Amino acid sequence: MSIAPAAMHLSNKHWQTPPTTADCIETAGVPCYAPFQLQRAYNLKRLYKQGLTGRGRTIVIVDALARRPCRPICSGGGRSHVFPRPPYQNGVSQAVHGRRGTPDISMSAAVDGGVLVNIGFTGGDGITPGYYIFGGTSEATPEFAGVVAIADQFAHQRLGLLNPALYQLARNHAPGIVDITAGDNTVSFTQQGQTFTVAGFAAVPSYDLATGLGTVDAAKLVHELGRH
């Protein structure tokens, strides 16, 4: 499973109690968000009302409202130089050609704000326990893992490798996978007074190398995966 984009720890600032958005802006210079925005972004509230919570494993609070262009960090995506196209990507060969294409799924991982992660222990690395702001894969991967944990609970079993199921659901236009058709992952940045632009890929209808199959409507995808 490949999830866009790259990992990022947004701030070394931390709090001992959950900060408000104003606290985050004042202390760290970026906003952070409340749990209801995670529910709204992935349509999770309906699942919680059904008692489906992933057995308490859904632990992230997400910024679903990123609007700025990718400066200086953007999501990954492209064709592998190492791995050939897997069978489950045969249906998107026009995008991936003969190579493994990434990503498979896109999740929110804004870097103009971010997810609050509670670090409750230290591993001898000098990190003080508390609430920190994260973005990138450090945000997106736990988001999708939380959705999969809820799907496991709904199915009453581990679902295993999801890639073939996700691509089949997308081929069938299952509503749990939400196509992203606008935007791109071209990135611009300034270094030593010079501006550089690295061309990325555009989001288009169906699979693309910027957003993969798209993002998710968790309330629908959980049931689709659990019944697949």
Image: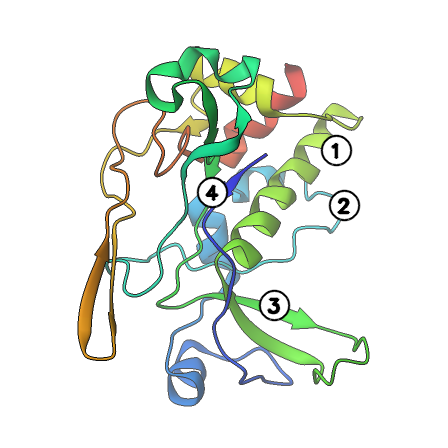
**Residue at 79% across / 75% down in the picture?**
121
Give the residue drawn at x 25%, y 49%.
186
Element type where label 2 sits in the image: loop
- Could you tell me residue 67's position as x and y percent? 26, 57
Specify whether 60 is left or right of 182. right
Q: Is residue 115 above or below residue 53?
A: below
Q: Nearer the viewer, mark 3 or mark 2?
A: 3
**Closer to the eye: label 3 or 1:** 3
3D distance between C-alphas at marks 2 and 1:
7 Å
Residue type, mark 3 in image: Val
Q: Secondary structure at mark 4?
A: helix
Which picture quadrant has residue 166? top right
In the depicted view, which residue is nearer to us: 92 or 153?
92
Find the distance from the CA under tag 1 to the CA under tag 4: 17 Å
Question: Pointer 2 and pointer 1: residues touching (CB < 8 Å)?
Answer: yes
Say the numbered circle drawn on residue 55: 2
Q: Tag 3 or tag 4, which sits nearer the N-term? A: 4
- The C terminus is located in which quarter? top right
* Residue 205 seen anywhere in this rendered image of the structure: yes
Q: CA distance from mark 3 to mark 1?
A: 23 Å
Q: Quadrant of residue 49?
A: top right
- Residue type at mark 1 is Gln
Q: Which residue is mark 3?
A: 117
State the quadrant of the N terminus: top right
Alpha-carbon span between mark 4 and mark 2: 18 Å
Mark 4 vs mark 3, foreground winner is 3
Residue at point 43% right, 11% down?
Answer: 91
Q: Which mark is residue 42?
A: 4
**Residue farthest left in this picture:** 194
